Amino acid sequence: MGENDSLDQFLSVAIEAAKRAGEIIRKGFHEKKNVEHKGQVDLVTETDKACEELIFNHLKQHFPEHKFIGEETDAANGTTELTDEPTWIIDPLDGTTNFVHGFPFVCVSIGLTIGKVPTVGVVYNPIINELFTGVSGKGAFLNGTPIKVSSQTELVKSLLATEVGTKRDKSTVDATTNKINSLLFKVRSLRMSGSCALNLCGIACGRLDLFYELGFGGPWDVAGGAVIVQEAGGVVFDPSGNEFNITSQRVAASNPHVKDAFVQALKEASK
């Protein structure tokens, strides 16, 4: 089996896992939720746990020799070491707060890294039935149709997405809102949809022009979306302008035209 055949198989198995987990999310979306708090505003539900178990089992059945990192198991155990081995990085339900409130921006995010490089990405929103996929060297797709990042060249005409994050101590909130205040004078408008993975997919399909987030949960938030952005012709980088590190809990993404201006605006907003 050649490498391309392997990547195709990895993708089809990941899509199957995402769709099965999506059925659980769709069912749970309209039912009363049993909610636990991971932190002050960070939530976890029985649906998160059920989806992660289903996805892990499905992938392990097909690829027992691969490594696995998942939000609900590994975040709880504090183990998120990434090696060069093929590693599936899973967020079973990105946008749990949205899920709890019945706000339809929720998704399953499945990413595969090989040699620490995001190589296969699947992000599925079962509520509005959008399946984003990307494989290194093969392009990015939304429900099977090729997608591309926006062609916007001006920051002032760009739509920016970010998130407030889960911490509510005064210094974090002040730093976050001060940065947003500064950026609002330089972009067209701001969106906070509550899902890092879907924000990345928004960049990939051109709905959004700019996205950054600091201090999100872990590599499971970005592993799937990063491939999809890159395969759609976009760039994923550290908000400082440095190279993207999947384990750093810092991410920015845009089309290539506005990247430099965006990095400059982020630097000025951090002063």
Image (cartoon, grey):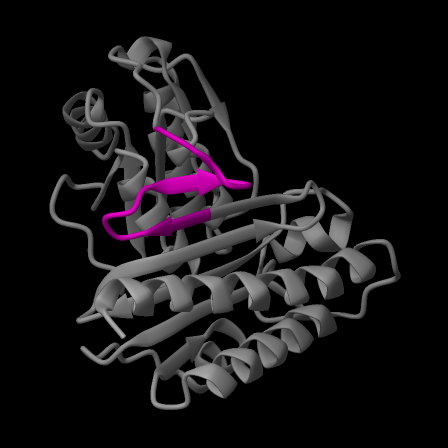
Residue bounds of the magenta highlight: 133-148
* Res 48 quadrant in image: bottom right
Residue at 82% x, 60% y is 27
Task: Identify the residue at horizontal 45%, vertical 86% (top origin).
Answer: 77
Q: Give percent across and percent down for residue 164.
A: 48, 43
Relative horizontal placement of residue 61, taking residue 10 as reference (left or right): right
Q: Is residue 93 among the parts visible in the rendering? A: yes
How far across and down, in percent of the image, does residue 74 sit? Answer: 44, 81
Is residue 146 found inside the magenta-colored segment of the image?
yes
Residue shown at 67% from the left, 60% from the top: 22
- Closer to the camera in the image, 261 or 25: 25
User: Which of the pair 182/259 is nearer the observer?
Assistant: 259
Q: Is residue 97 above or below residue 71?
A: above
Across and down, in percent, residue 58 comes to: 56, 79
Q: Residue furthest left?
A: 242
Residue 72 picture quarter? bottom right
Left or right: 103, with 186 as reference point: right
Q: State the residue lying farthest toward the front.
A: 1
Q: In the rendered structure, does residue 18 fall within the stretch colored magenta?
A: no
